[in-house]
Amino acid sequence: MNLPDLMELAVTRRVSDVHLAPDRSPAFRVDGALRALNEEYDSLSPEECEEVIFSMLNEKQMKALDEKLEIDMSHSLDLPSGRTRFRVNIHRQQRGLAAVFRIISSVIPTPEQLTMEESIYRFSKVPRGLVLFTGATGTGKSTTMACLINLINERSPKHILTVEDPIEYTYEEKKSCITQRELGMHTHGFGPALKSALRDDPDVILVGEMRDLETIHLALTASETGHLVFSTLHTSDTSQTVDRIIDVFPSSQQALVRSQLASVLQGIVTQVLLPLASGTGRIAAREILLATPAVRTMIREGNSHQLYNSLTGGINVGMCPLELSLAAKVRQGLITEEVALGQANRPTMLNDYLKATNFSFSVPGLAVAKPEEIESEEQDL
């Protein structure tokens, strides 16, 4: 099997992920569905899989794979369609060595292409604080963050620092200076990189994932010391996100962390990707929480379970419950009701929105950003 040929086929078919494993044909994930290429490729033997995967690795990566049995890395190929980058996970499994490739677009989407809500666009204009993007793997969190980073890059003379595992989108410097660091290649971990970042004069910091206590603590500290920090968590709603951050700390520190998070948080965006009713392509639905004074008080006092009430009560200032976003897309004919119900955290609320006779798409939480119409002054939300 020729890897460049396979990846060129994946690019032309708008594939998001490519799966390689012994004793089966390669598989493509298209619009969220995984499809094996049984008619186009024979099953790969363990030896063929190893040969293809080892062809991508340098000596250091080979050693890391031998020691850890799995590695994450970025890889690029010169294909007929152009130079293409991939995020790759290589791991050993029962039948041998396997790999999953995530195709990374060379073009960072615009807010209009992402149907990004105006509330999210405004996160690119806040001068400091913490903005979190949450959701399952493969829901487009990194793409949404990359869009915001690129907006800052196009508009502001700032130093933007990204720490990722691995680097996904790369940026052409415009008005900003951009430093990108990859775990395993440029730093040994998020913690050491963030400690160093505070001495590197950054204005904006992107942390690929807040996955442990040290990283979360340093991200909060960076936000508190006047930086704008973007990061991700694998949580499914806003209250779960707040609880995850607090619960990672020892109980003796949690009151302090609640106060710290309440003071630095600018917003939380929970995102899902949904197949379009047309059968081709996907669209994002998003839950948007803005850190209003009421929200900060709930976090500070440990009442994260009440945050959903703030979402529903804050629609007029740009917040949006996930169920409202889903209902809007059902009403617009973009997704089916069945798909929406499968993603809703509160199906009863979704049904209420769908049945509402006074339903309106003009609420701020659903308004798609039109950058040319939004003022350029930076301000805290």
Image: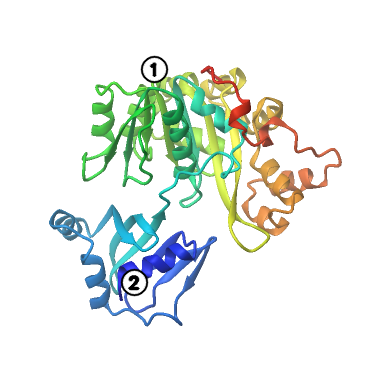
Residue 206 in the image: state x and y as whole percent: 38, 34
Crowd band around label 1 with a 10 angstrom C-alpha radius: few (<14), some (14–19), many (20+): some
Quadrant in which the C terminus appears:
top right
In the rendered structure, which disc, 1 or 2, sits on the residue that comes first in sequence?
A: 2
SS assignment at label 2: loop
The amino acid marked with disc number 1 is Gly
Q: Is residue 257 above or below residue 362?
A: above
The answer to which of 51 and 215 lies nearer the viewer is 51
Q: Is residue 226 above or below residue 135?
A: above
Residue 17 in the image: state x and y as whole percent: 43, 61
Q: Is residue 234 visible?
A: no
- For residue 226, the mark is 1
Residue 288 in the image: state x and y as whole percent: 60, 34
- For residue 21, the mark is 2
The answer to which of 369 and 243 lies nearer the viewer is 369
Structural distance between the alpha carbons of marks 1 and 2: 46 Å
Q: Residue at x 36, y 81 (%)?
A: 43
- For residue 166, the mark is none
SS assignment at label 1: loop
Quadrant position of residue 328 = top right
